Image (cartoon, rainbow, N blue to C red):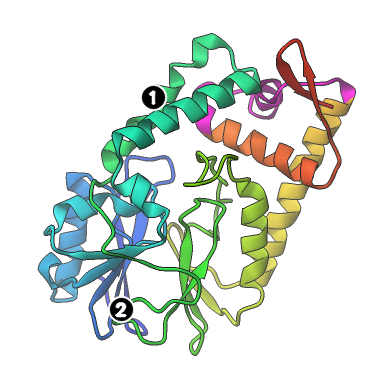
Amino acid sequence: MVEWINGIAKITVPTPFAVGDVHVYVIKGDRLTLIDAGVKTPAAWEAFKHQLKDLKLIPQDIEQVVLTHHHPDHIGMLDFFLPDLEVYGHPVNERWINRTADFMKQYDAFYLQLFKDSGVPDRLFPKIQQMKKTLQFACNRSLTGTLLEGDTPPGMYGWSVIETPGHAQSHIGLLDERRGLFIGGDHLLAHISSNPLLEPPLPGKAERPKPQLQYNESLKKLLSYPIEKIYPGHGPDVLNIHELVEKRLSRQHDRAMQVKEMIHEKPLTTFEICKRLFPKVYERELSLTMSETIAQIDYLQSLDQIHKLEENGQIFYC
C-alpha cells in the first residue's frame, strides 16, 4: 500500500535489468511532481498506475516530471504520459532522452575508438551495437526546462538542486534542507555501489569525462549538507550517509590498489586489466566492466600512481 510520508509517496516499478525494481517519487507541492519515470515497459506502467490509485491519483494528475538522470530505468515511462507533460532535468539529459542520428553516430565513434585504444579484440566490437539495446526502454521526448546547481524546480518550494555527476553526467539530486531529506537517484545506494559510467565527450568538449573522479567528489559533496535520509532510485532508504560514503570511497581506493599491483607486475592494456578484474563477466557485461576498469585507471592516474605507455600503436599502463 503506497502512502504519503512527509508529502512524499514512493512508488516501485519493475525493470528488465539486473538492478531490479526502481523507485519513483510523487511529491506534493504547488505542482504535483513525479521524480523520475521508470522504464518503458507495459509491466512498469501498469504497476505505476495501480500504485497511484492508492493515492487516489491517475497519471493525468501528474503536473510535471523532474529527472535525476537519463538512464533508461529512470526516464522510459515518459512516453506513456501525455505529450504536453512538462519535464525538467539537467541539460545533459537532452541528448539521451531525445536521441538524434548525429548523437548516435558520436556514440558509436566514441566507443569504437575507446575499444581500439583499450586493446579490445575486434571480435568484441559488435558489442557496441548490443550496448544500445537498453535504449529501447528509454523515452523519446525533449526537456521542457533545465535545472542546475541551486535551482528550485517549478512548484517545489523548499527543494533545491544539487549536481552530482559521476554515475551519469546528467545526475542531480533534490535537497529539502529544512527536513534533511534528499532524493538521490542512483548517486548513493544502500545495497550496491553505483557504477560511474563512461559517456562520450560533453557538447563543446574534446575529451571524455572522468566519471570516477567526478563521482568521488560528488560523494564527498553530500557530507557538506545536513542530510538525514536519502530516498534512492533502488533499494532501501539510506540513513547512515557519512558511514556509507566513507565505505564506498574506501572500497573504490582498495580496488584501484589492486589494479596498481597488477600493472606493476607488467604493463597491461585496459582490456587486459578488465579481464583480470572481471574474469567471469567481462564479455557478457563489457560496457559495465570496461567503465569500471577505466574508472580505476583514471583514479590511479589522478594520484600519479601509474603511467601511460604507447608501444606499436597500443596503449599500456605501467
Mark 1 Cα-neighbour bin, 10 Å: few <14, some 14–19, many ≥20: few
Tell me: 52 left or right of 128.
Answer: left
| Side of 279 relative to 113 (left or right) | right
- The quadrant in which residue 34 appears is bottom left
On-image quarter of the N terminus: bottom left
Residue behind mark 1:
130
Image point (48%, 16%), residue name: 125
Q: Is residue 225 above or below residue 141?
A: below
Q: Are marks 2 and 1 in contact (CB under 8 Å)?
A: no
Does the rendering let one see residue 281?
no
Q: Which residue is mark 2?
A: 154
C-alpha separation, residue under disc 2 versus residue under disc 1: 38 Å
When asked about the image quadrant of residue 9, the answer is bottom left
Q: Quadrant of residue 305?
A: top right
Q: Residue at x 72, y 63 (%)?
A: 246
* Residue 156 position in % (x across, y down): 33, 81
Locate residue 314, reporting x and y percent.
71, 16
Measured as percent of width and height from the top left, residue 47 is found at 20, 56
Query: Mark 2 is on which residue type?
Result: Pro
Q: Position of residue 202 (x, y in %)?
A: 50, 46
Inspect this view and state whether residue 92 appears: yes
Which is more N-terminal, label 1 or label 2?
1
Q: Residue at x 74, y 42 (%)?
A: 255
Q: Is residue 209 magenta?
A: no
What's drawn in magenta, residue-wise? 265-287
Examine the rendered structure and indicate whether residue 173 appears above or below residue 214: below
